[in-house]
Amino acid sequence: MEVYKGVSEESDARYLLSYINDVLIPASEEFFTLLNQNQVLLHHAFSFNTILSHAIDYMVFIAKKVNKSSGNSSVIKRKDFISKFDEKYHVDGCSHINNKFKLLDAVNNSFKHVELEQKRYADLIKMYGDLNFHNLSADDGKVFFKSQLYSFDYCRVVMRPIAKIFDCNIKTHNDVDDFINGRIHGSFGYGNFLYEYEPYDAIDRMIDFCDSECIDCGEIDDRCDCVSYIYDQKSGERSPNIDPNFDFNDVMSNISGTRVWRKK
């Protein structure tokens, strides 16, 4: 199901395009620099969380306007709209947190307001417990989301994959409609492997296999802290992004066709 059916006005589309390309993308580049160097402070996390959340406001505005102009009597509610983002967008990353957009929105509003509206966030409060801006805390260049049952790197598990969704080079009026309806989006590419490899791809395939990023946090090997994360009182684990069709013997034979490689 599409978020809305119809075409947004060009002026509204340009407004969203300007926000994404002139504000969100540059902020993402700065955020990822801090993230990769483990230099994220609490105010960095809240600032970028607000920028990502505000992009949702623009999209909700456009969807409501299109819905009204098309004569659709149904009312688009922000809460339902955000739920559709979590269903529709291919937000790669941690399988433990499948409500990234809703959690992003709740963290943003817990930062802006003294108290969250209990009814509006009842499902999240039931899952994570009481939500307020103290759920985020800085620790040695990282910012964690912590509650009674959860403890994980909020920047890497939630904001990192969401930020990449917006990085898809949308430029036109039609791109905006496709983006809001989830037909185009940026992606880290987890699970999106080529299936018709050439022999000369073998070395790159082996490097990717041996040095794969964790799907949950985006880190490689000993930099991954996922085993220390807690999701609903259950320990996290490293989830390497490995080609499901990778065959060690086949790849090694392409790297060195004069030798027979066997697993021991």
Image (cartoon, rainbow, N blue to C red):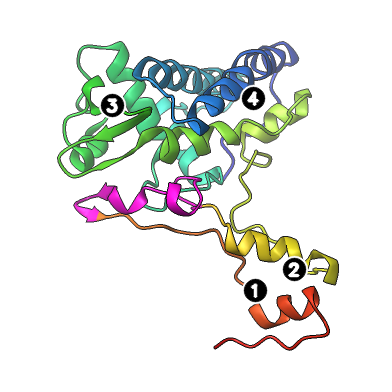
- On the image, the x and y values in percent for residue 74 come to 48, 30
Q: Which mark is residue 136?
A: 3
Residue contact between numbered discs 4 and 3, judged by CB atoms under 8 Å: no
Distance, label 1 to label 2, CA atoms, is 8 Å
Among the two numbered marks 1 and 3 on one chain, the one whose residue lies closer to the N terminus? 3
44 inside magenta stretch: no
The residue to which callout 2 is attached is: 195
222 inside magenta stretch: yes
Residue density around tag 1, few if under 14, some if 14–19, many if 20 or more, within 10 Å:
few
Residue density around tag 3, few if under 14, some if 14–19, many if 20 or more, within 10 Å:
many
Rendered position, 137 above or below 192:
above
In the image, taking residue 86 as reference, residue 146 lies left or right, namely left
The residue to which callout 1 is attached is: 245
Name the element at disc 3. strand
Magenta segment, which residues?
A: 214-234
What type is the residue that disc 2 sits on?
Tyr
Distance, label 4 to label 3, CA atoms, is 41 Å
Rendered position, 40 above or below 80:
above
Among the two numbered marks 4 and 2 on one chain, the one whose residue lies closer to the N terminus? 4
What type is the residue that disc 3 sits on?
Leu
Residue contact between numbered discs 4 and 2, judged by CB atoms under 8 Å: no
Among the two numbered marks 1 and 2 on one chain, the one whose residue lies closer to the N terminus? 2
What type is the residue that disc 4 sits on?
Ser
Residue at the (61%, 30%) spot, across then down: 166
Distance, label 1 to label 4, CA atoms, is 46 Å
Residue mark closest to the camera, 4 vs 2: 2
Answer yes or no: is residue 260 visible: yes
The residue to which callout 4 is attached is: 70
Among the two numbered marks 1 and 4 on one chain, the one whose residue lies closer to the N terminus? 4
Front-most of residues 246 and 222? 222
